[in-house]
Amino acid sequence: MLEWRPMGGGPRPVPGPAATPSVWAVTSAGALALVTAFNLLDHQGDPTLDLIALSVIAALVSTGARLTAAPGTALLCWVILNGFAIPPMGRLSWTAPHDAGRLACLFAAAVIGTAAARLAHARAAYRRLTP
């Protein structure tokens, strides 16, 4: 027996998050392009500007991600920041107070981006469902 259902008349669901590997790929490409552009324009200037820009990238990319992708997003941004924006370039190092703070900042940006997007989608869905 065939059952006919309307295809566009019902409430639209909250959009699902993107797959975590694609979020991480976009994060890596965007962060690497941003740090490369800053290095060409700034000639290894202050890494604080790189950190702020990478935090914005992490927050923007995380708007379409699951919350479980936030640690990986922050780690990828930190690796690119530490490897290509902080001298000496190409060498990963760990300076406990500085790098822990940078990693926490990037993680907070990813979590805030994800939470803000999920709340905005849930609020929009609630408005569509209520009369």
Image (spheres, rainbow, N blue to C red):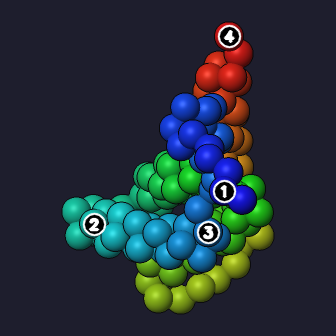
Query: Percent x, y for residue 46?
Result: 42, 58
Instruction: Tell which circle, 1 or 3, labels the residue nearer the N-terminal end.
Output: 1
Q: Earlier in the sequence, mark 1 or mark 2?
A: 1
Which mark is nearer the camera, 3 or 2? 3
How far is the residue under mark 4 from the one under mark 3?
Answer: 33 Å
Instruction: Determine which quarter of the picture holds residue 84.
Output: bottom left
Residue 71 visible? yes
Alpha carbon distance from label 1 to label 4: 31 Å
Tell me the kind of residue under disc 3.
Ala
Mark 1 and mark 4 in contact? Answer it, CB < 8 Å: no
Q: Quadrant of residue 93?
A: bottom right
Image position of 80 (left or right of 122): left
Q: Amino acid at mark 4?
A: Pro
Residue at 53% x, 89% y: name it.
91
> In this figure, which residue is indicated by the disc labeled 1?
2
- Residue under label 2: 37
Label pair 2/4, CB-CB below 8 angstroms: no
Q: Are marks 3 and 2 in contact (CB under 8 Å)?
A: no
Q: Amino acid at mark 2?
A: Ala
Q: Which residue is mark 3?
A: 19
Q: Position of residue 34 (x, y in %)?
A: 36, 64
Q: Secondary structure at mark 3?
A: loop
Cα–Cα gap, marks 3 and 2? 27 Å
First in sequence, mark 2 or 4: give its number.
2
